[in-house]
Structures are given as C-alpha cells and as structure tokens.
Amino acid sequence: MELKKLFGLGPACFTVAAIVLSLAYYLEALSQFPKLPISDYASTLIFIIAILLTLGLAAWGILSLPPKKRGTELVTDKAFKYFRHPIYAAFLDFFIFGLGFYLKSFGILIAGVFLIFVCGKVVESEEKQLAGKFGKKYADYQKKTKKFVPWLY
C-alpha cells in the first residue's frame, strides 16, 4: 500500500501544526504574555480528557475507514457522518486545545483556531481528488458534513 494513500496529507498538516504551535509558544514566552488563569489540577484534567478524546476519535476514524479501503469507497457513516477528516479533527479539535490548557497558553489556543483553517486549506487538494473520484456523491457529502468541526467548519 502506498504511503500517500495510507496517510493522505496528514504528515504535512501535522508538520505545519508543529511549527506554528512551537512558534506561538516561543513568541508567547518571549513576550512574557500572562498564562491562562487556570489551576494545575484543572489544566491537567482537561489535557487528559483531550488526549482520551483525541485517541478515541482517531481510532473511530481509522475503524470507520480501514487503510485498505481508502480511496476505493466513499464512507459517509460512523465518524465520517460528523467529520470529513476525523483524524485531523481529533488532533485539531481536541489535542491542540488540551495542550493549550495544559501549558496554560493563550498562544497555543489562538494558534489552534488558526490551524483549523490552515489545515482546511491543506486538505483541499485531497478533497479535489475525492470529488474527482466520487463526483456528485462527494459534493453532496461536502454540503452536509463539515471538515473538522461538526456544524461549523
């Protein structure tokens, strides 16, 4: 199985995210911007919950569309009923925001919102390929299912 079919554009999105998050955290520390006013207990609890949600959604996404079926059939149920890209969504919706709370970082939280839109642009080429392969079915699916954030984006 070729790696592009297995991973899609995930590595590119995660690389961009790592750079943006590192830069946001570094600039925030450099500017001595105040930390989120949250207790260590609460920030740790939020991060643990975020990790569990990330792992759960990522696993659900993988189980909803096993690697052998990627690019061969259009799945619009299970995790794909709520997210067109559930593994990206797991990382963008839960992990980054949990990390922001754990690090008590306004910069990470703001970068997380920014990254939702950046990764949205990154996956456009993948979506064009899917639209070319599945035609009207994929166009209809795009109209009713959001990329990363159910009912929003």
Image (cartoon, rainbow, N blue to C red):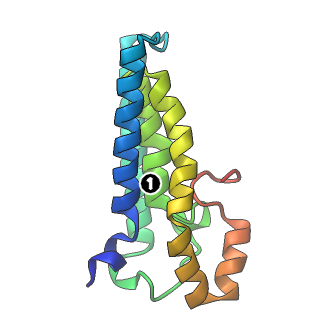
Q: Nearer the viewer, residue 148 or 113?
A: 113
Q: Is residue 64 left or right of residue 80?
A: left
Q: Residue at x 41, y 81 (%)?
A: 70
Quarter of the N terminus within the rendering: bottom left
Residue 24 sits in which quadrant?
A: top left
Residue 90 drawn at (x, y percent): 45, 51
**Count of number-bearing discs:** 1
Give the class, few, some or many, for how many residues have Cα within 10 Å of label 1's Cα (few <14, many ≥20): many
Residue 65 drawn at (x, y percent): 43, 74
| Amino acid under disc 1 | Leu
Residue 110 drawn at (x, y percent): 54, 31
Q: Is residue 5 above or below residue 93?
A: below
Look at the numbered disc 1 and give the secondary structure of its residue: helix
Q: Residue at x 38, y 67 (%)?
A: 62
Q: Residue at x 44, y 84 (%)?
A: 71
Please indicate, yes or no, whether residue 45 appears anywhere in the rendered image.
no
Residue 142 sits in which quadrant?
A: bottom right
Please indicate, yes or no, whether residue 141 appears anywhere in the rendered image.
yes
Q: Nearer the viewer, residue 101 or 63?
A: 101
Q: Is residue 134 left or right of residue 69?
A: right
Residue 18 drawn at (x, y percent): 34, 44
For mark 1, what is the residue? 57
Q: Nearer the viewer, residue 45 or 128?
A: 128
